[in-house]
Image: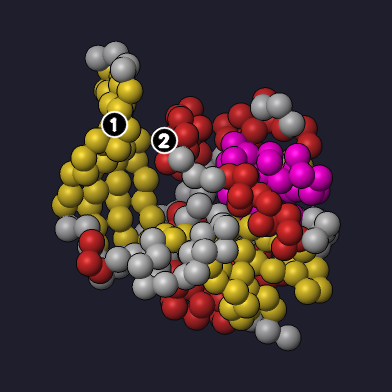
Amino acid sequence: MSYDPAAYGEVWAPVYDDMLAATERDAQAAAEQVADLAGGGRVLEFGVGTGRLALPLASLGAEVVGIDASRPMLDRLAAKPGGDRVTAVLGDFVAERVDGEFAVVLIAFNTLFAVPEQRLQVATLRNAARHLSPGGAVVVEAFVPDENRRTPPHHVAGARYRAPDHVSFTIQNHDAVAQRIDSAWVRITGGQTEVLENTIRYAWPAEIDLMAQLADLLLDQRWGGWREEPFTASSRDHVSVYRPSA
């Protein structure tokens, strides 16, 4: 399977902020939690994108470095108010080494799943661990796969976003053996149709824990969300905090 770390940003950068607005993710709560975990130390975000979390983190006074393989994503980050407060690094976070040490390495919003092979996900966690200062933490946010709502092999989702001038929906191919979902996000705007593709390789929290152990990281805390909601069998997402095992 070929892996192009810049491909996602090349396709999604023009619509990324609109997509995030439709998901109604609570960026401020996430930023406050990460700033608290960092305790005044530096924060490195893998897959910083257009700065959804990096910008509020920087506004809280944190020194933030963000790495992304997509130049269009980083250009949009730089153009936003406060973008100059985030140090942007163009590179593949699977292996790229950023100068210095960090109190928190953040892998948010299913970014770990955007790396479509297990061995590369392990490499990502190993690279995150290499950047930690003593006592630091790797923080992973991801959705929890749900067997009770398993996506069939071929699936057309309902409208995921509607507005007076456009509608969008998702078509998915799901390989449950490979834990892989290939998606096409179809946007119809003003009579024009645009198709944006994406691939993820999902993992259950227990598998992420095992991959983290291969990177010499152990689970320290896990919540059902950024407000430290309890993680339960019904949680749809998790925020997991890993610390070095030695």
Residue bearing mark 2: 22
Residue at point 34% right, 41% down? 197
Q: Is residue 136 above or below residue 19?
A: below
Q: Earlier in the sequence, mark 2 or mark 1?
A: 2
| Crowd rating for badge 1 (residues with CA inside 10 Å; few <14, some 14–19, many 20+) | many
Specify the amino acid type for callout 2. Ala
Quadrant for the C terminus in the image = bottom right
Q: Is residue 192 left or right of residue 57?
A: left
Pair 2/1: label in front: 2
Q: Is residue 55 above or below residue 229?
A: above
Q: Is residue 35 left or right of residue 113?
A: right
The one of 239 and 184 positioned closer to us in this rendering:
239
Specify the amino acid type for callout 1. Ser
Q: Is residue 141 left or right of residue 207?
A: right
Residue bearing mark 1: 168
Residue 133 percent across, percent down from the top left: 80, 68
Q: Range of the magenta residues?
A: 43-65
Count of marks overlaid on the render: 2
Q: What is the distance, in whole Å, between disc 2 and disc 1 at their CAs?
A: 11 Å
Residue at point 44% right, 76% down? 207
Q: Is residue 161 visible?
A: yes
Residue 129 percent across, percent down from the top left: 68, 70
Say whether marks 2 and 1 touch (CB < 8 Å): yes
Q: Is residue 92 visible?
A: no
Residue 64 is covered by the magenta coloring: yes
Q: Is residue 74 above or below residue 53?
A: above
| Crowd rating for badge 2 (residues with CA inside 10 Å; few <14, some 14–19, many 20+) | few
